[in-house]
Image (cartoon, rainbow, N blue to C red):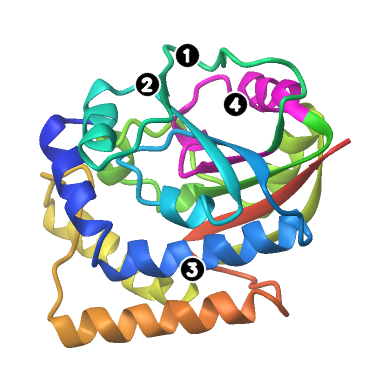
Amino acid sequence: MKKTEYARMEEHEKNYWWHLGRLRIIKTYVTRALQEKQKVKIMNVGCGTGGTIDMLEKFGTVDNVDISEDAIKYMKQNGYTRITKVDDIKLPFKNKSYDMVVAFDVLEHIENQTGAMKEWNRILKDDGVVVITVPAYQWLWSDHDKSLYHQRRYTTGRIKQVAAEGGFKVEKKSYAIVFSLPMVVGFRYLNKITGKKVDSETSYVEVPKSVNWLFKQFLYFEAFMHNFVKFPFGTTVVTILRKK
């Protein structure tokens, strides 16, 4: 990702509805996955500019890895020190040393997704758990995915298959960011018929503050509902995987 895009991401993580709403949904799944365990060790793969770290640190100690020097630079500027640069899917950590691995919108960037899953399995304790988010539906593939260097998009079924290959069983899987699916479909279709190209990797659509607040409330409510239901569609897949 371009350096300018990391700057935009770091800024939007603080106030943009998608980031704030997704963070609340992620917290719901992390809470469920840990089953009231406290002071756990968490590996945050592909930490980016650090928008999830404060939330994760409420559950224990968080180690962060990323391949980007630019991402690490923003991490350090924001006061985070537990950060390690990696060059590929290999993680410089001991076997069975973590209670949880999280990877939020990361797996779709990794060519060898099964190898990455097996590496996460290696560093997890025997009762370890993974929480991941990935973009949904290959039929939503667009220039936005190309500019972000995505390898693929997912369904809940595809995640289940990859998880099994990596030595995990699915504990809970659902689609998420539900209300935005019609908007994303319409936006992608409009760009397609007009021939408009994505000129920004993060592709934020700026909205008035009142709309930003409203969209955020929609996702906060969705995060609450994830405690009780599995959504049949959405723009994201969110999954809890348990080590076999």
Magenta-colored stretch includes residue 148: no
- Residue at 81 percent across and 29 percent down: it is 167
Q: Position of residue 166 (x, y in %)?
A: 75, 27
Across and down, in percent, residue 190 comes to 21, 64
Q: Secondary structure at mark 3?
A: helix
Which residue does the image show at 62% across and 16% down from the upper left?
93
Q: Is residue 94 above or below residue 197?
A: above
Label 4 – label 3 distance at C-alpha? 26 Å
Residue 18 position by quadrant: bottom left
**In 3D space, how far apart are the residues under numbered discs 2 and 1 (Cα atoms)?**
7 Å
Q: Going from the N terminus, do you reach mark 4 or mark 3 first? A: 3
Q: Is residue 106 magenta?
A: yes
Location of the N terminus (image quadrant): top left
Q: Which comes sooner in the sequence, label 2 or label 4?
A: 2
Which kind of residue does numbered mark 3 sit on? Arg
Which residue type does callout 1 highlight? Asp
Q: Can residue 194 be spotted in the picture?
A: yes
Mark 2 and mark 4: span between their CA atoms? 16 Å
Q: Which residue is mark 1?
A: 88
Task: Provide the residue designation for mark 3.
Answer: 24
Q: Magenta segment range?
A: 100-124
Q: Is residue 145 left or right of residue 105?
A: left
Q: Which residue is tagged 2?
A: 67
